[in-house]
Image (tube, rainbow, N blue to C red):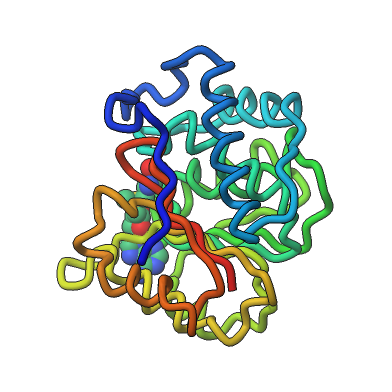
Amino acid sequence: MAIEHRSSDWTEYKMVYDDPHRQVEPAEREIATVDDVLATLRGQGIIDAVGYDHDRFLAHRAAVAEQFEIPWTAITPRMQRLLYALNAIRKPAVMVAAGVFCGNTFFSNAGAGAGPGACYEAKELLGIEIKPDEAERAERNVRRIDPTGVARIIAADAVDVARDHPGPIDLLYLDADGDAARGKGIYLEILQACYDRLSPGALVLAHNSINCAERLCHYLAWVRDPANMKAGVNVMIDGEGLEVSAR
Ligand SMILES: C[S@@+](CC[C@H](N)C(=O)[O-])C[C@H]1O[C@@H](n2cnc3c(N)ncnc32)[C@H](O)[C@@H]1O
């Protein structure tokens, strides 16, 4: 049985995909929506705190808006804040993101550990994108705001990278849309390829838990089995959704 966290307005809340920096609701409402999610996740034992630095988050958001080339994104402002907050709270030494397109989805996670919004010292923040030209653009974007190289993008198949990563992985973010046969169903392959190297309490975040729920049915059934993941919540604050699971 999936635990759901629904904001009252998740069906009405909309962004414009090719205008990702437009504010679509008052800041207080965005903050309150994300705070409610964090409280639910803490209640389920998935995270152990709910606080994050709002000014650093805004520095991160501003740098991405100014420096990133983003043709489109489905990461809503709410989701951007939530991903940043989860990383700021969990502070993963190693974060791996699969299927990062132009890098916005990756840096919504990595921005808590690199760039002007960094709030902890990370060891490796790795984004994986299978299309070489997209990986190049994502890497260009990331280099503009993280000169250190801690956050970086590689052009590769996320299943291979997950299988070969030495671990431990503290946070795994899934957004790859696979090929025509697998689509987002590839999430389960990626997770299973590195499952034995997830650290205790590792977070696994799966984007599109709502609008791709059908394609993700095997993944969702697997992570919702307590034999595999100790806890999870389907976060419904926008039309995309995020399945948050803890190892
Ligand atoms: C739809 S995009 C994610 C976009 C993101 N949700 C956003 O809103 O910015 C999914 C990306 O996954 C990549 N991808 C598909 N299969 C992959 C794989 N096996 N390994 C790595 N990346 C993959 C695609 O090339 C694509 O750029």
| Residue 241 in picture, x, y percent from top left | 37, 46
Q: Say whether residue 196 is visible.
A: yes
From this view, report whether residue 175 is shown above or below residue 137: below
User: 183 and 48: which one is in front?
Assistant: 48
Which one is in front, 122 or 225?
A: 225
- At 56% from the left and 57% from the top, the residue drawn is 153
Seen in the picture, residue 99 relative to 29 is either above or below; the reply is below
Q: Position of residue 133 (x, y in %)?
A: 39, 52
Q: Nearer the viewer, residue 7 or 148?
A: 7
Q: Quadrant of ligand 1?
A: bottom left
**Residue 221 location in percent, x, y?**
33, 73
Residue 130 appears in the rendering: no
Residue that extends furthest to the left in the rendered view of this protein: 181
Q: Which image quadrant for residue 156?
A: bottom left
Spot the residue most to the top: 26
| Residue at 47 percent of width and 21 percent of height | 21
Q: In the displayed image of the protein, which residue is found farthest to the right?
A: 121
Q: How many marks?
A: 0
Residue 160: quadrant of the picture: bottom left
- Residue 97 located left or right of residue 133: right
Residue 201 is situated, as x and y percent measured from the top left of the image, at: 67, 70
Front in this rendered view, residue 109 or 158: 109
Taking 150 as reference, is 172 left or right?
A: left
Q: Residue at x 77, y 41 (%)?
A: 118
Q: Is residue 66 left or right of residue 124?
A: left
The quarter of the rendered structure image containing the C terminus is bottom right
Q: Residue at x 75, y 33 (%)?
A: 116
Split into 4 quadrants, where in the image is the N terminus? bottom left
